[in-house]
Image: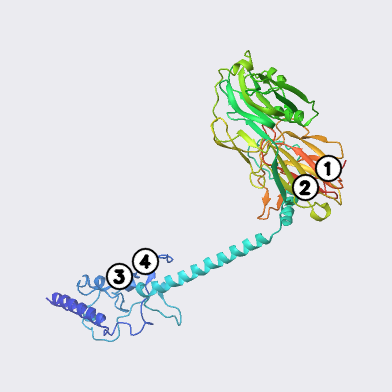
Protein backbone atom coordinates (compact mmCIF):
# COMPACT_ATOMS: atom_id res chain seq x y z
CA UNK A 1 0.00 0.00 0.00
CA UNK A 2 2.73 2.43 0.95
CA UNK A 3 4.54 1.71 -2.27
CA UNK A 4 1.40 2.28 -4.33
CA UNK A 5 0.78 5.58 -2.58
CA UNK A 6 4.36 6.62 -3.23
CA UNK A 7 4.05 5.77 -6.90
CA UNK A 8 0.85 7.81 -7.22
CA UNK A 9 2.48 10.74 -5.46
CA UNK A 10 5.49 10.44 -7.73
CA UNK A 11 3.26 10.67 -10.80
CA UNK A 12 1.53 13.75 -9.41
CA UNK A 13 4.86 15.34 -8.54
CA UNK A 14 6.17 14.66 -12.05
CA UNK A 15 3.11 16.26 -13.60
CA UNK A 16 3.41 19.23 -11.33
CA UNK A 17 7.06 19.69 -12.08
CA UNK A 18 6.38 19.54 -15.84
CA UNK A 19 3.73 22.23 -15.50
CA UNK A 20 6.09 24.39 -13.49
CA UNK A 21 8.80 23.98 -16.13
CA UNK A 22 6.38 25.04 -18.84
CA UNK A 23 5.30 28.07 -16.82
CA UNK A 24 8.88 29.01 -15.98
CA UNK A 25 8.35 28.92 -12.22
CA UNK A 26 10.08 25.67 -11.38
CA UNK A 27 12.84 26.28 -8.83
CA UNK A 28 14.95 23.70 -10.63
CA UNK A 29 14.59 25.45 -14.01
CA UNK A 30 17.56 27.60 -15.10
CA UNK A 31 17.02 31.24 -14.12
CA UNK A 32 19.22 32.59 -16.91
CA UNK A 33 20.78 31.43 -20.16
CA UNK A 34 24.03 30.98 -18.33
CA UNK A 35 22.51 28.01 -16.47
CA UNK A 36 20.99 26.35 -19.56
CA UNK A 37 22.05 23.11 -21.19
CA UNK A 38 23.46 23.48 -24.72
CA UNK A 39 21.94 21.64 -27.69
CA UNK A 40 24.70 20.03 -29.77
CA UNK A 41 25.18 18.68 -33.30
CA UNK A 42 25.87 15.09 -34.15
CA UNK A 43 28.57 16.18 -36.65
CA UNK A 44 30.01 19.44 -37.98
CA UNK A 45 27.14 21.54 -39.21
CA UNK A 46 26.16 21.28 -42.85
CA UNK A 47 24.03 23.95 -44.38
CA UNK A 48 20.43 22.78 -44.46
CA UNK A 49 21.09 19.50 -42.66
CA UNK A 50 18.84 20.36 -39.67
CA UNK A 51 20.15 17.37 -37.74
CA UNK A 52 20.19 18.55 -34.11
CA UNK A 53 19.71 16.34 -31.07
CA UNK A 54 19.76 16.76 -27.29
CA UNK A 55 22.52 15.41 -25.11
CA UNK A 56 20.90 12.35 -23.50
CA UNK A 57 23.80 10.84 -21.61
CA UNK A 58 23.03 9.15 -18.21
CA UNK A 59 23.62 12.38 -16.32
CA UNK A 60 20.88 14.25 -18.22
CA UNK A 61 17.94 11.90 -18.67
CA UNK A 62 14.45 13.25 -19.36
CA UNK A 63 11.64 12.92 -16.88
CA UNK A 64 10.11 9.96 -18.68
CA UNK A 65 13.24 7.90 -18.06
CA UNK A 66 13.47 8.91 -14.43
CA UNK A 67 9.94 8.01 -13.46
CA UNK A 68 9.39 5.13 -15.86
CA UNK A 69 6.52 6.73 -17.82
CA UNK A 70 6.24 9.31 -20.58
CA UNK A 71 4.80 12.74 -19.97
CA UNK A 72 1.27 13.55 -21.13
CA UNK A 73 1.02 14.38 -24.85
CA UNK A 74 -0.66 17.70 -24.11
CA UNK A 75 2.44 18.82 -22.22
CA UNK A 76 5.27 18.80 -24.79
CA UNK A 77 8.88 19.00 -23.77
CA UNK A 78 10.34 22.52 -23.97
CA UNK A 79 13.83 21.29 -24.66
CA UNK A 80 15.27 22.50 -21.32
CA UNK A 81 16.65 19.85 -19.06
CA UNK A 82 16.62 20.20 -15.27
CA UNK A 83 20.01 20.04 -13.58
CA UNK A 84 20.02 17.75 -10.62
CA UNK A 85 16.93 15.79 -11.68
CA UNK A 86 18.97 12.76 -12.65
CA UNK A 87 18.28 9.40 -11.01
CA UNK A 88 20.72 7.86 -8.65
CA UNK A 89 23.71 6.13 -10.15
CA UNK A 90 23.09 2.61 -11.33
CA UNK A 91 23.17 0.11 -8.48
CA UNK A 92 21.82 2.49 -5.79
CA UNK A 93 18.14 2.34 -4.85
CA UNK A 94 16.25 5.59 -4.74
CA UNK A 95 14.34 6.12 -1.46
CA UNK A 96 10.77 7.28 -0.98
CA UNK A 97 11.97 10.13 1.21
CA UNK A 98 13.94 11.55 -1.68
CA UNK A 99 10.83 11.52 -3.78
CA UNK A 100 8.65 13.08 -1.09
CA UNK A 101 10.65 16.33 -0.85
CA UNK A 102 9.75 18.27 -4.00
CA UNK A 103 9.67 21.62 -2.17
CA UNK A 104 13.33 21.51 -1.22
CA UNK A 105 15.22 24.18 -3.14
CA UNK A 106 18.45 22.23 -3.51
CA UNK A 107 18.30 19.41 -6.08
CA UNK A 108 19.65 16.00 -5.46
CA UNK A 109 23.26 16.13 -6.55
CA UNK A 110 25.11 13.41 -8.38
CA UNK A 111 28.74 13.05 -9.26
CA UNK A 112 29.34 14.94 -12.56
CA UNK A 113 30.91 13.03 -15.43
CA UNK A 114 34.55 14.05 -15.92
CA UNK A 115 34.12 14.67 -19.60
CA UNK A 116 31.15 16.97 -19.05
CA UNK A 117 32.69 19.18 -16.36
CA UNK A 118 32.56 22.74 -17.74
CA UNK A 119 35.73 24.75 -17.82
CA UNK A 120 36.21 27.67 -15.56
CA UNK A 121 34.15 30.78 -16.44
CA UNK A 122 32.52 28.88 -19.30
CA UNK A 123 29.01 29.94 -20.15
CA UNK A 124 26.46 27.29 -20.97
CA UNK A 125 23.58 28.57 -23.03
CA UNK A 126 20.45 27.17 -24.55
CA UNK A 127 20.65 27.66 -28.34
CA UNK A 128 17.64 26.52 -30.26
CA UNK A 129 17.96 25.63 -33.95
CA UNK A 130 15.08 27.94 -34.83
CA UNK A 131 16.95 31.03 -33.55
CA UNK A 132 20.56 30.10 -34.45
CA UNK A 133 20.16 28.64 -37.94
CA UNK A 134 19.05 31.84 -39.70
CA UNK A 135 22.03 33.75 -38.34
CA UNK A 136 24.39 30.97 -39.35
CA UNK A 137 22.84 30.77 -42.81
CA UNK A 138 23.07 34.54 -43.19
CA UNK A 139 26.70 34.43 -42.17
CA UNK A 140 27.39 31.65 -44.65
CA UNK A 141 25.63 33.54 -47.43
CA UNK A 142 27.74 36.61 -46.73
CA UNK A 143 30.92 34.53 -46.68
CA UNK A 144 29.94 32.84 -49.92
CA UNK A 145 29.18 36.18 -51.56
CA UNK A 146 32.53 37.54 -50.42
CA UNK A 147 34.30 34.42 -51.70
CA UNK A 148 32.57 34.74 -55.09
CA UNK A 149 33.41 38.43 -55.26
CA UNK A 150 37.03 37.69 -54.43
CA UNK A 151 37.19 35.01 -57.15
CA UNK A 152 35.58 37.35 -59.67
CA UNK A 153 38.10 40.09 -58.85
CA UNK A 154 40.95 37.61 -59.15
CA UNK A 155 39.66 36.36 -62.53
CA UNK A 156 39.22 39.93 -63.77
CA UNK A 157 42.73 40.84 -62.68
CA UNK A 158 44.11 37.75 -64.39
CA UNK A 159 42.22 38.52 -67.61
CA UNK A 160 43.47 42.11 -67.55
CA UNK A 161 46.99 40.91 -67.01
CA UNK A 162 46.73 38.49 -69.91
CA UNK A 163 45.26 41.23 -72.11
CA UNK A 164 48.20 43.48 -71.30
CA UNK A 165 50.62 40.69 -72.05
CA UNK A 166 52.28 41.49 -75.38
CA UNK A 167 52.99 39.05 -78.18
CA UNK A 168 56.66 39.43 -77.44
CA UNK A 169 56.07 38.02 -73.97
CA UNK A 170 54.28 35.09 -75.56
CA UNK A 171 57.26 34.62 -77.83
CA UNK A 172 59.55 34.41 -74.81
CA UNK A 173 57.21 31.90 -73.18
CA UNK A 174 57.15 29.82 -76.36
CA UNK A 175 60.94 29.86 -76.54
CA UNK A 176 61.24 28.78 -72.90
CA UNK A 177 58.74 25.98 -73.50
CA UNK A 178 60.82 24.74 -76.42
CA UNK A 179 63.93 24.65 -74.21
CA UNK A 180 62.32 22.35 -71.64
CA UNK A 181 63.30 18.69 -72.05
CA UNK A 182 60.59 16.22 -72.91
CA UNK A 183 59.14 14.37 -69.94
CA UNK A 184 60.16 10.72 -69.58
CA UNK A 185 57.17 8.43 -69.82
CA UNK A 186 56.62 4.69 -69.79
CA UNK A 187 53.70 5.07 -72.20
CA UNK A 188 53.98 3.54 -75.68
CA UNK A 189 55.88 5.77 -78.07
CA UNK A 190 53.57 7.96 -80.11
CA UNK A 191 53.98 8.21 -83.90
CA UNK A 192 56.32 10.92 -85.12
CA UNK A 193 54.62 14.22 -86.07
CA UNK A 194 54.42 15.12 -89.75
CA UNK A 195 57.74 16.20 -91.20
CA UNK A 196 58.15 19.97 -91.51
CA UNK A 197 60.48 20.59 -94.40
CA UNK A 198 60.90 24.33 -93.83
CA UNK A 199 59.97 25.04 -90.21
CA UNK A 200 60.38 28.51 -88.75
CA UNK A 201 63.71 28.80 -86.94
CA UNK A 202 62.61 31.23 -84.21
CA UNK A 203 59.29 32.67 -82.96
CA UNK A 204 58.53 35.98 -84.59
CA UNK A 205 55.85 38.63 -84.14
CA UNK A 206 54.11 39.86 -87.33
CA UNK A 207 51.65 42.59 -88.21
CA UNK A 208 49.10 42.51 -91.06
CA UNK A 209 49.93 44.58 -94.14
CA UNK A 210 47.01 46.40 -95.81
CA UNK A 211 46.34 45.45 -99.45
CA UNK A 212 43.97 46.84 -102.06
CA UNK A 213 42.35 44.54 -104.62
CA UNK A 214 40.76 44.99 -108.05
CA UNK A 215 39.41 42.34 -110.44
CA UNK A 216 40.09 42.88 -114.12
CA UNK A 217 40.41 40.89 -117.34
CA UNK A 218 38.25 38.44 -119.25
CA UNK A 219 36.20 35.40 -118.27
CA UNK A 220 37.28 32.37 -116.28
CA UNK A 221 35.55 29.10 -117.25
CA UNK A 222 35.90 26.74 -114.28
CA UNK A 223 35.12 23.02 -114.44
CA UNK A 224 35.75 21.34 -111.07
CA UNK A 225 32.22 20.19 -110.23
CA UNK A 226 31.67 17.28 -110.27
CA UNK A 227 35.32 16.69 -109.47
CA UNK A 228 35.08 12.90 -109.70
CA UNK A 229 34.02 11.57 -113.10
CA UNK A 230 31.56 8.69 -112.93
CA UNK A 231 30.20 9.07 -116.48
CA UNK A 232 31.28 10.81 -119.65
CA UNK A 233 29.73 14.05 -120.86
CA UNK A 234 30.03 17.83 -120.95
CA UNK A 235 31.29 19.05 -117.57
CA UNK A 236 30.82 22.73 -118.40
CA UNK A 237 30.00 24.84 -121.45
CA UNK A 238 29.51 28.54 -122.23
CA UNK A 239 29.60 30.92 -125.18
CA UNK A 240 32.63 33.21 -124.93
CA UNK A 241 34.38 36.05 -126.73
CA UNK A 242 37.51 38.05 -125.94
CA UNK A 243 40.02 37.00 -123.27
CA UNK A 244 39.21 33.62 -121.76
CA UNK A 245 40.87 31.26 -119.28
CA UNK A 246 39.63 27.66 -119.24
CA UNK A 247 40.47 25.54 -116.19
CA UNK A 248 39.43 21.89 -115.96
CA UNK A 249 40.08 19.66 -112.95
CA UNK A 250 38.64 16.12 -112.97
CA UNK A 251 39.53 12.73 -111.49
CA UNK A 252 38.72 9.48 -113.30
CA UNK A 253 36.49 7.47 -110.92
CA UNK A 254 35.59 4.86 -113.55
CA UNK A 255 37.34 1.58 -114.25
CA UNK A 256 38.18 2.45 -117.87
CA UNK A 257 40.57 4.86 -119.56
CA UNK A 258 39.25 8.34 -120.36
CA UNK A 259 40.42 11.55 -121.96
CA UNK A 260 39.58 15.23 -121.48
CA UNK A 261 39.54 18.14 -123.93
CA UNK A 262 38.23 21.67 -124.52
CA UNK A 263 36.32 21.90 -127.79
CA UNK A 264 35.51 25.23 -129.46
CA UNK A 265 32.54 25.41 -131.86
CA UNK A 266 31.80 28.34 -134.16
CA UNK A 267 28.04 28.67 -134.69
CA UNK A 268 28.32 32.14 -136.18
CA UNK A 269 28.61 33.32 -139.76
CA UNK A 270 32.14 34.71 -139.50
CA UNK A 271 35.49 33.06 -138.96
CA UNK A 272 36.76 33.00 -135.41
CA UNK A 273 40.46 33.67 -134.86
CA UNK A 274 41.86 32.05 -131.73
CA UNK A 275 45.14 33.12 -130.10
CA UNK A 276 46.45 30.63 -127.52
CA UNK A 277 48.51 32.73 -125.09
CA UNK A 278 49.35 30.41 -122.21
CA UNK A 279 49.09 26.66 -121.70
CA UNK A 280 49.51 24.85 -118.41
CA UNK A 281 48.96 21.08 -118.61
CA UNK A 282 50.68 18.03 -117.15
CA UNK A 283 50.44 14.29 -117.48
CA UNK A 284 47.41 12.90 -115.55
CA UNK A 285 48.43 11.00 -112.43
CA UNK A 286 47.15 9.74 -109.09
CA UNK A 287 49.75 11.98 -107.38
CA UNK A 288 47.47 15.02 -107.24
CA UNK A 289 49.97 17.44 -105.71
CA UNK A 290 52.56 16.57 -108.33
CA UNK A 291 49.99 17.19 -111.08
CA UNK A 292 48.99 20.53 -109.56
CA UNK A 293 52.57 21.74 -109.22
CA UNK A 294 53.63 20.55 -112.70
CA UNK A 295 50.65 22.32 -114.29
CA UNK A 296 51.59 25.59 -112.58
CA UNK A 297 55.26 25.31 -113.53
CA UNK A 298 54.16 24.85 -117.13
CA UNK A 299 51.67 27.73 -117.00
CA UNK A 300 54.09 30.24 -115.42
CA UNK A 301 57.04 28.99 -117.49
CA UNK A 302 58.11 29.86 -121.01
CA UNK A 303 55.32 29.87 -123.58
CA UNK A 304 55.00 29.52 -127.33
CA UNK A 305 52.09 31.42 -128.82
CA UNK A 306 49.82 29.66 -131.27
CA UNK A 307 47.03 30.90 -133.58
CA UNK A 308 44.31 29.01 -135.46
CA UNK A 309 41.03 29.80 -137.24
CA UNK A 310 37.62 28.20 -136.80
CA UNK A 311 35.32 28.47 -139.80
CA UNK A 312 31.54 28.93 -139.38
CA UNK A 313 29.95 25.62 -138.29
CA UNK A 314 33.34 24.10 -137.49
CA UNK A 315 34.68 22.53 -134.27
CA UNK A 316 38.31 22.42 -133.12
CA UNK A 317 40.16 21.25 -130.03
CA UNK A 318 41.73 24.14 -128.15
CA UNK A 319 44.82 22.17 -127.04
CA UNK A 320 45.50 18.98 -129.03
CA UNK A 321 48.30 18.00 -126.59
CA UNK A 322 45.77 17.80 -123.79
CA UNK A 323 43.37 15.64 -125.81
CA UNK A 324 46.13 13.09 -126.42
CA UNK A 325 46.73 12.48 -122.69
CA UNK A 326 45.30 9.33 -121.16
CA UNK A 327 43.32 9.47 -117.91
CA UNK A 328 43.76 6.10 -116.25
CA UNK A 329 41.43 5.05 -113.42
CA UNK A 330 42.18 7.19 -110.32
CA UNK A 331 44.22 9.75 -112.28
CA UNK A 332 43.75 13.53 -112.08
CA UNK A 333 43.63 15.64 -115.25
CA UNK A 334 44.34 19.33 -114.62
CA UNK A 335 44.77 22.03 -117.24
CA UNK A 336 44.76 25.83 -117.40
CA UNK A 337 44.73 27.52 -120.82
CA UNK A 338 44.47 31.23 -121.71
CA UNK A 339 43.21 32.21 -125.15
CA UNK A 340 41.64 35.13 -127.00
CA UNK A 341 38.92 34.83 -129.64
CA UNK A 342 37.60 37.68 -131.81
CA UNK A 343 34.09 36.24 -132.42
CA UNK A 344 31.70 34.27 -130.22
CA UNK A 345 32.35 30.53 -129.94
CA UNK A 346 30.92 27.76 -127.76
CA UNK A 347 33.54 26.36 -125.40
CA UNK A 348 32.74 22.84 -124.14
CA UNK A 349 34.87 21.06 -121.49
CA UNK A 350 34.32 17.36 -122.07
CA UNK A 351 35.38 13.99 -120.63
CA UNK A 352 35.01 11.05 -123.00
CA UNK A 353 36.12 7.47 -123.58
CA UNK A 354 39.71 7.11 -124.70
CA UNK A 355 38.74 5.58 -128.05
CA UNK A 356 36.20 8.26 -129.00
CA UNK A 357 36.65 11.42 -131.08
CA UNK A 358 36.00 14.55 -128.98
CA UNK A 359 34.58 16.45 -131.98
CA UNK A 360 31.89 13.87 -132.76
CA UNK A 361 31.35 13.07 -129.07
CA UNK A 362 29.64 16.46 -128.70
CA UNK A 363 26.76 15.42 -130.95
CA UNK A 364 25.05 13.35 -128.24
CA UNK A 365 27.03 14.22 -125.10
CA UNK A 366 24.87 15.03 -122.05
CA UNK A 367 25.53 18.02 -119.80
CA UNK A 368 26.63 16.79 -116.37
CA UNK A 369 24.97 18.77 -113.57
CA UNK A 370 26.89 20.25 -110.65
CA UNK A 371 26.60 18.63 -107.22
CA UNK A 372 26.57 21.94 -105.34
CA UNK A 373 27.04 25.68 -105.89
CA UNK A 374 30.81 26.06 -105.96
CA UNK A 375 33.91 25.55 -108.13
CA UNK A 376 32.05 25.69 -111.42
CA UNK A 377 30.80 28.40 -113.75
CA UNK A 378 31.79 31.60 -115.53
CA UNK A 379 33.58 34.33 -113.53
CA UNK A 380 34.09 37.77 -115.05
CA UNK A 381 37.40 39.38 -114.06
CA UNK A 382 39.82 36.46 -114.25
CA UNK A 383 42.79 38.45 -112.88
CA UNK A 384 43.06 40.04 -109.43
CA UNK A 385 45.31 43.04 -108.90
CA UNK A 386 46.55 43.19 -105.31
CA UNK A 387 48.59 46.24 -104.32
CA UNK A 388 50.09 47.35 -101.03
CA UNK A 389 48.06 50.20 -99.55
CA UNK A 390 51.27 51.95 -98.50
CA UNK A 391 55.00 51.76 -99.07
CA UNK A 392 56.82 49.03 -97.18
CA UNK A 393 59.97 50.17 -95.39
CA UNK A 394 61.65 47.17 -93.77
CA UNK A 395 63.50 49.05 -91.05
CA UNK A 396 60.38 50.94 -89.99
CA UNK A 397 57.63 48.37 -90.50
CA UNK A 398 59.31 45.14 -89.35
CA UNK A 399 57.85 41.72 -90.18
CA UNK A 400 54.54 41.96 -92.05
CA UNK A 401 52.19 39.56 -93.83
CA UNK A 402 49.02 39.38 -95.93
CA UNK A 403 46.62 36.59 -96.84
CA UNK A 404 45.63 35.04 -100.16
CA UNK A 405 42.47 32.96 -100.43
CA UNK A 406 41.18 33.31 -96.86
CA UNK A 407 37.70 34.48 -97.92
CA UNK A 408 37.86 37.54 -95.64
CA UNK A 409 40.68 39.95 -96.41
CA UNK A 410 40.83 38.27 -99.82
CA UNK A 411 37.24 37.60 -100.88
CA UNK A 412 36.17 34.61 -102.98
CA UNK A 413 34.80 35.30 -106.46
CA UNK A 414 31.14 34.82 -107.41
CA UNK A 415 29.92 33.75 -110.84
CA UNK A 416 27.12 31.91 -112.62
CA UNK A 417 26.64 28.40 -113.98
CA UNK A 418 25.63 29.10 -117.59
CA UNK A 419 24.05 25.64 -117.94
CA UNK A 420 21.24 26.33 -115.45
CA UNK A 421 21.69 29.91 -114.13
CA UNK A 422 22.81 28.93 -110.61
CA UNK A 423 24.93 31.47 -108.67
CA UNK A 424 28.30 29.89 -107.94
CA UNK A 425 31.22 30.63 -105.60
CA UNK A 426 34.84 29.99 -106.48
CA UNK A 427 35.89 28.83 -103.01
CA UNK A 428 39.66 29.31 -103.02
CA UNK A 429 39.71 31.46 -106.18
CA UNK A 430 41.16 28.62 -108.26
CA UNK A 431 42.03 29.79 -111.76
CA UNK A 432 42.31 33.44 -110.65
CA UNK A 433 45.74 34.90 -111.43
CA UNK A 434 47.04 37.21 -108.67
CA UNK A 435 49.24 40.09 -109.81
CA UNK A 436 50.71 41.36 -106.52
CA UNK A 437 52.64 44.64 -106.30
CA UNK A 438 54.39 45.72 -103.10
CA UNK A 439 55.74 49.31 -103.17
CA UNK A 440 58.93 49.31 -101.10
CA UNK A 441 62.28 51.00 -100.59
CA UNK A 442 65.03 51.80 -98.07
CA UNK A 443 66.34 48.38 -97.26
CA UNK A 444 66.41 44.75 -98.22
CA UNK A 445 64.07 42.04 -97.05
CA UNK A 446 63.23 38.38 -97.48
CA UNK A 447 59.89 37.04 -98.70
CA UNK A 448 58.26 33.76 -97.73
CA UNK A 449 55.14 31.76 -98.53
CA UNK A 450 53.42 30.00 -95.60
CA UNK A 451 50.56 27.48 -96.05
CA UNK A 452 47.69 27.86 -93.58
CA UNK A 453 45.13 25.31 -94.75
CA UNK A 454 47.05 22.11 -95.37
CA UNK A 455 49.33 20.60 -98.02
CA UNK A 456 50.44 23.00 -100.72
CA UNK A 457 52.49 22.70 -103.94
CA UNK A 458 52.68 25.37 -106.64
CA UNK A 459 54.85 28.05 -108.23
CA UNK A 460 55.38 31.83 -108.17
CA UNK A 461 56.75 34.23 -110.78
CA UNK A 462 58.79 37.04 -109.19
CA UNK A 463 59.96 40.39 -110.64
CA UNK A 464 61.46 43.50 -109.07
CA UNK A 465 61.26 47.20 -109.96
CA UNK A 466 58.24 47.10 -112.24
CA UNK A 467 59.35 44.35 -114.57
CA UNK A 468 62.76 45.82 -115.43
CA UNK A 469 64.46 42.61 -114.30
CA UNK A 470 64.16 39.04 -115.56
CA UNK A 471 61.22 37.12 -114.03
CA UNK A 472 62.25 34.35 -111.71
CA UNK A 473 60.11 31.21 -111.41
CA UNK A 474 60.18 29.78 -107.87
CA UNK A 475 58.73 26.47 -106.79
CA UNK A 476 56.67 26.58 -103.61
CA UNK A 477 58.14 24.57 -102.05
CA UNK A 478 61.35 23.58 -103.79
CA UNK A 479 60.86 19.94 -102.85
CA UNK A 480 58.10 17.63 -104.08
CA UNK A 481 55.68 15.31 -102.34
CA UNK A 482 53.09 15.69 -99.59
CA UNK A 483 55.34 17.19 -96.91
CA UNK A 484 54.84 20.94 -97.15
CA UNK A 485 51.89 22.16 -95.10
CA UNK A 486 50.89 18.68 -93.98
CA UNK A 487 50.66 19.89 -90.38
CA UNK A 488 47.93 22.38 -91.30
CA UNK A 489 47.13 25.21 -88.89
CA UNK A 490 49.43 25.05 -85.82
CA UNK A 491 47.74 24.99 -82.40
CA UNK A 492 50.20 27.58 -81.08
CA UNK A 493 49.17 30.28 -83.55
CA UNK A 494 48.33 33.54 -81.80
CA UNK A 495 46.34 36.36 -83.38
CA UNK A 496 44.92 39.38 -81.59
CA UNK A 497 42.00 41.61 -82.58
CA UNK A 498 44.24 43.82 -84.70
CA UNK A 499 45.59 40.88 -86.68
CA UNK A 500 49.00 40.88 -85.01
CA UNK A 501 50.12 37.28 -84.82
CA UNK A 502 52.93 35.05 -83.71
CA UNK A 503 54.90 32.92 -86.13
CA UNK A 504 56.28 29.92 -84.23
CA UNK A 505 58.59 26.98 -85.04
CA UNK A 506 55.43 24.95 -85.65
CA UNK A 507 54.69 27.06 -88.73
CA UNK A 508 56.12 26.12 -92.12
CA UNK A 509 57.46 28.55 -94.69
CA UNK A 510 59.19 28.32 -98.05
CA UNK A 511 61.52 31.13 -99.15
CA UNK A 512 60.76 33.21 -102.21
CA UNK A 513 64.07 35.06 -102.11
CA UNK A 514 65.99 38.08 -100.82
CA UNK A 515 65.21 41.44 -102.45
CA UNK A 516 66.54 45.01 -102.48
CA UNK A 517 64.11 46.68 -104.89
CA UNK A 518 64.31 50.39 -105.55
CA UNK A 519 60.61 50.77 -106.16
CA UNK A 520 58.48 47.62 -105.95
CA UNK A 521 58.32 43.86 -105.75
CA UNK A 522 55.94 41.99 -108.07
CA UNK A 523 54.59 38.46 -107.59
CA UNK A 524 52.43 36.45 -109.97
CA UNK A 525 50.72 33.36 -108.60
CA UNK A 526 47.46 31.41 -108.59
CA UNK A 527 46.00 28.90 -106.10
CA UNK A 528 47.24 25.55 -107.47
CA UNK A 529 44.91 22.61 -108.03
CA UNK A 530 44.98 19.91 -105.30
CA UNK A 531 46.44 22.43 -102.80
CA UNK A 532 44.80 24.00 -99.77
CA UNK A 533 44.20 27.61 -98.84
CA UNK A 534 44.72 30.14 -97.41
CA UNK A 535 48.38 31.06 -97.63
CA UNK A 536 50.39 33.95 -96.22
CA UNK A 537 53.02 36.06 -97.95
CA UNK A 538 55.51 37.19 -95.28
CA UNK A 539 58.13 39.95 -95.55
CA UNK A 540 61.10 39.94 -93.11
CA UNK A 541 63.56 42.88 -92.96
CA UNK A 542 67.25 42.30 -93.55
CA UNK A 543 69.11 42.11 -90.25
CA UNK A 544 66.60 39.78 -88.62
CA UNK A 545 67.29 36.07 -88.46
CA UNK A 546 65.85 34.23 -91.49
CA UNK A 547 62.67 32.31 -90.75
CA UNK A 548 64.02 29.13 -92.36
CA UNK A 549 67.51 27.75 -92.68
CA UNK A 550 67.45 27.80 -96.47
CA UNK A 551 66.32 31.44 -96.73
CA UNK A 552 69.77 32.85 -97.43
CA UNK A 553 70.64 36.24 -98.72
CA UNK A 554 71.16 36.04 -102.47
Q: Are circles 1 and 4 on residues that touch, CB within 8 Å?
A: no
Residues packed near mark 4 inside 10 Å, few (<14), some (14 to 19) or many (20 plus): few
Residue farthest to the left, as pictured: 1
Tell me the crowding category of disc 3: few under 14, some 14 to 19, or many 20 or more residues within 10 angstroms, Cα based: few
Q: Earlier in the sequence, mark 1 or mark 2?
A: 2
| SS at badge 4 | loop
Mark with earlier residue (4, 2)? 4
From the viewer's perspective, is 457 left or right of 463?
left
Percent across and percent down for residue 470 are 86, 36
Res 234 seen here: yes
| 438, above or below 128, in the image | above
Provide the residue designation for mark 2: 202
Relative to 501, 256 lies left or right: left
Q: How far apart in space, not on screen, are marks 4 and 3 (Cα)?
A: 34 Å
How far apart are the alpha carbons under marks 3 and 2? 88 Å
**Viewer-nearest residue: 107 or 385:** 385
Q: Is residue 337 visible?
A: no
Kindly identify which residue carries mark 3: 90
Q: Position of residue 27 (x, y in %)?
A: 28, 85
The quadrant the C terminus occupies is: top right
| Residue that badge 1 annotates | 466
Marks 1 and 4, how far apart in space? 87 Å
Q: Secondary structure at mark 3?
A: loop
Q: What residue sits right under mark 4 in the picture?
A: 50
Residue at 74% across / 56% down in the picture?
A: 168
Residue 538 or residue 95, whichever sits in front: 538
Amino acid sequence: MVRNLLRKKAKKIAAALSSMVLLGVCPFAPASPAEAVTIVHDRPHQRGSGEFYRNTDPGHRPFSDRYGESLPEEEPDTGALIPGSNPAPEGEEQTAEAVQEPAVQEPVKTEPQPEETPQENQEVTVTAPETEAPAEKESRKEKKKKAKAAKAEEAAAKAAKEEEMSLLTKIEAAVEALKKPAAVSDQPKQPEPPKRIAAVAKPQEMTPWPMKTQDIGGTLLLSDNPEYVEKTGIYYTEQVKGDVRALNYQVNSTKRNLRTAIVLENKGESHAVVHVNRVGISEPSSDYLAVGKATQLAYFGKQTARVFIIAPGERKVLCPEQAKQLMKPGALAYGCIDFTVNNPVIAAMVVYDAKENPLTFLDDAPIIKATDNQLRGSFTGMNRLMTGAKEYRPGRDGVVYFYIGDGESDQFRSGIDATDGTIMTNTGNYGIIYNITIPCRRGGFRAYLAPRGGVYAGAVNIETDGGSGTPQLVETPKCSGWDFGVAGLPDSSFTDKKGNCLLTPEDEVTPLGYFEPKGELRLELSPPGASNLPIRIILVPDGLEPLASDAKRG
